[in-house]
Image: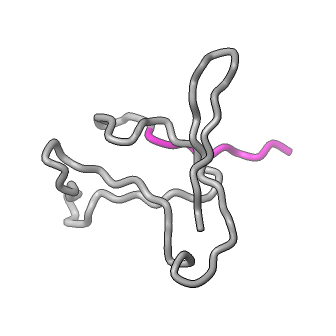
């Protein structure tokens, strides 16, 4: 199963939501976190190639937008932190 873990930064008050992993068994093994782009009517948007506008998120991705937020071309909706060695 995959979950979102939310936390608030004391200094800024910004809430971040991170995709975290839990044990995956049975039906939950097929669940994959994703962002789906929808129009004002709630219909899933289609890309120019005909595919639906759905973007899968890896474990560790940090969401930058709230559920239902309006986004425009170029907006960052999630980021993937890099490891520093």
Above or below residue 13? Residue 67 is below
Identify the image's colour scheme: rainbow, by chain, secondary structure or one colour: one colour
Where is residue 35? Give x, y as percent.
40, 53
Q: Residue furthest left?
A: 41
* Screen quadrant of the N terminus: bottom right
Q: Quadrant of the C terminus?
A: top right
Percent across and percent down for residue 20 are 65, 55
Extreme-right residue of the structure: 85
Give the side of residue 20 with respect to residue 79, left or right.
right
Task: Name the residue located 17 percent from the left edge and 55 percent from the top edge.
Answer: 43
Q: Name which quarter of the figure residue 71 lies in.
A: top left
The residue drawn where x is 22% and y is 57% is: 44
> Which residue is farthest top?
11
- Picture coordinates of residue 46 (x, y %)? 20, 58
Magenta stretch: includes residue 12 = no
User: Residue 73: where, in percent of width, then height?
Assistant: 30, 37
Kindly indicate the quadrant of the structure image that contains residue 81.
Answer: top right
- Compared across the picture, whether 57 is left or right of 41 comes to right
Q: Is residue 9 left or right of residue 48?
A: right
Q: With respect to residue 7, does 44 lie above or below?
A: below
Comparing 32 with 24, the one in front is 24
Identify which residue is drawn at 58% across, 57% down: 3
Q: How many discs mark residues in the rendered view?
A: 0
Range covered by the magenta-colored residues: 77-85
Q: In this rendering, would 66 be left or right of 3?
A: left
Furthest-bottom residue in this view: 26
Would you identify the image quadrant in which residue 36 lies?
Answer: bottom left
Q: Is residue 70 above or below residue 31?
A: above
* Dominant SS type (magenta): loop
Identified at 19% across, 50% down, the residue is 42
């Amino acid at each position: 199963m995959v979950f979102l873990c939310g936390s608030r930064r004391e200094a800024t008050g910004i809430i971040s939501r991170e995709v975290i992993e839990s044990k995956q068994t049975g039906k939950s093994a097929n669940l994959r976190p994703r962002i789906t782009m929808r129009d004002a009517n709630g219909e899933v948007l289609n890309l120019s190639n005909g595919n639906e506008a759905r973007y899968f998120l890896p474990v560790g991705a940090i969401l930058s937008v709230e559920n239902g937020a309006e986004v425009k071309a170029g907006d960052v909706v999630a980021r993937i932190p890099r490891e520093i060695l």
